[in-house]
Amino acid sequence: MQTDDRELLHLFRQPATKEKAFTALIKKYQEKLYWHVRRMVIDHDDANDVLQNMFIKVWNALEGFREDSQLYTWLYRIATNESLTFIEQQKKRAAVSLSDVESGLSNKIIADKNFDSNKLEWKLQLAIQQLPEKQRLVFNLRYYDEMPYEEMSRILETSEGALKASYHHAVKKIEDFIKNH
Amino acid sequence: MEKKKYILEELQELNSSIGQVANCFEVPIGYFDIFYEEVITRIKEQQLPHRSFQVFTVPVNYFEDLPATILSHVTQQLPSSALPFAVPENYFDGLANNILQKIKTNTAEETVAEELQNISGFVANIPKTNVFTVPENYFNQLGVNIPANKEEAKVEHITSTKRWVRYVAAACVIGLIALGGYVWLSNGKTDSSNSFTKAASIEKNIAKLSDTEIYNYLSTHPASSDIINVSAETAIPDINTSIQNMSDDEIQQYLDNNEEPGEKEIKGI
């Protein structure tokens, strides 16, 4: 664990400095976690909701956080679970199948005011939405966050070998999608 | 010679003629000149252990060079397929370093970019720009509404009367659920066991019938009529409809006749 995180946790456990420490924690990790969530749920408002709920859960659970794991790994795991729960809730609410939710996410991308179907970076976003949830997570964590497989393994509780295979499949699917669309 | 002379003189003094007899034996000319050489040669021959090998000779350093000579012959006789391989010059001098370099390269963590390039050069060449935008100053004002401390829950003191009412109501609900469950389970068991037995016997009987008999039966007994009959037999009367058809007096009378124990006390409260 980083020394700063230790210090933040120490301050969080003191009633006098609890809120100050928590504010510092949010500021430290908000952007990384926001983009992780945003890439999963696409819409800013949805990402904001998920992020806020996630940090509220962190507030409630941080006291019991075991320092034998890294704080940011733990935060990533909560953000991931919260994102997946949100997507699951959307599925239930709309009473649609998984493919419908994926096309819904694709529609959100297409609806973006800056969307340009001729640009590869936008096509890439559409291609990512075609992936199964787990592959999408792995691709985002590796491609955008450049996260080592070892850390990813702790967050997603999956073996490094399986993650490498998952990333490999994801990249191949993305390549196929972009070439055929 | 002095002794010979002495001996001859002695024989003459004895008047013996022996001394005048000439030596009748002869030796080959020069015999004694070479005799000692022959004797010495024979003595030497007897001292050598293997007289029979003595006749053979070997070239100088023959035995010292023999292993190398044999190996040379063996090598020349090996199959020619073992020989066409060749290694680059100084190959073995740099081999250890090359292997170590390779080990270091393999153990080094492959970067994300290298990995992606290896999987798909196409995807690796896509510009890695963030296409999403966030509202201005979003991160500066991002805050979380921290839940307020939980207020101490109000403790409502209930009177002994209220407590009795609740206990009795709870007991009634539990009793009704238990009774309903018992009735449902017992009916279900009976029905299911009966239906299994019936189904088994029907299947057996049907198996005995010919296709023509089954066809004739079905043509004269439409399936819908069976369903109607079964439905009529097993239909459960609609309670709501029955209650709607009853007058208030009839309901009151039913309740009076089927009073639960302790109900009067509750009414009295």
Image (cartoon, coloured by chain):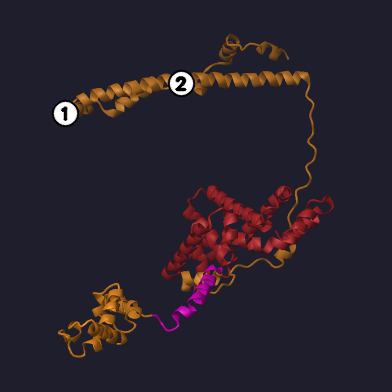
Q: Residues within 10 Å of mark 2 (few under 14, many from 20)?
A: few
Q: Residue furthest left?
A: B24
Main secondary-structure element of the magenta-colored stretch? helix
Residue B235: % across, % down: 41, 22
- Mark nearer the N terminus (1 vs 2): 1
SS category of the residue bearing label 2: loop
Which residue sits at x=75%, y=21%? B162
In the image, the segment drawn in magenta is B87-109
Residue B212, numbered label: 1
Residue A136: % across, % down: 52, 60
Q: Is residue A81 above or below residue B79?
A: above
Which residue sits at x=48%, y=21%? B185
Q: Amino acid at mark 2?
A: Pro
Instruction: Please check the rendered image and state whether residue B99 is part of the magenta-colored stretch, yes or no.
Output: yes
Colour-to-chain, red:
A
- Look at mark 2 in the image and give the residue it sits on: B237
Which residue sits at x=58%, y=19%? B176
Q: Chain of mark 2?
A: B
Q: Is residue B169 left or right of residue B54?
A: right
Question: Which mark is nearer the camera, 1 or 2?
Answer: 1
- Comparing B98 with B33, the one in front is B33
Q: Residues within 10 Å of mark 1 (few under 14, many from 20)?
A: few
Residue A139: % across, % down: 53, 63
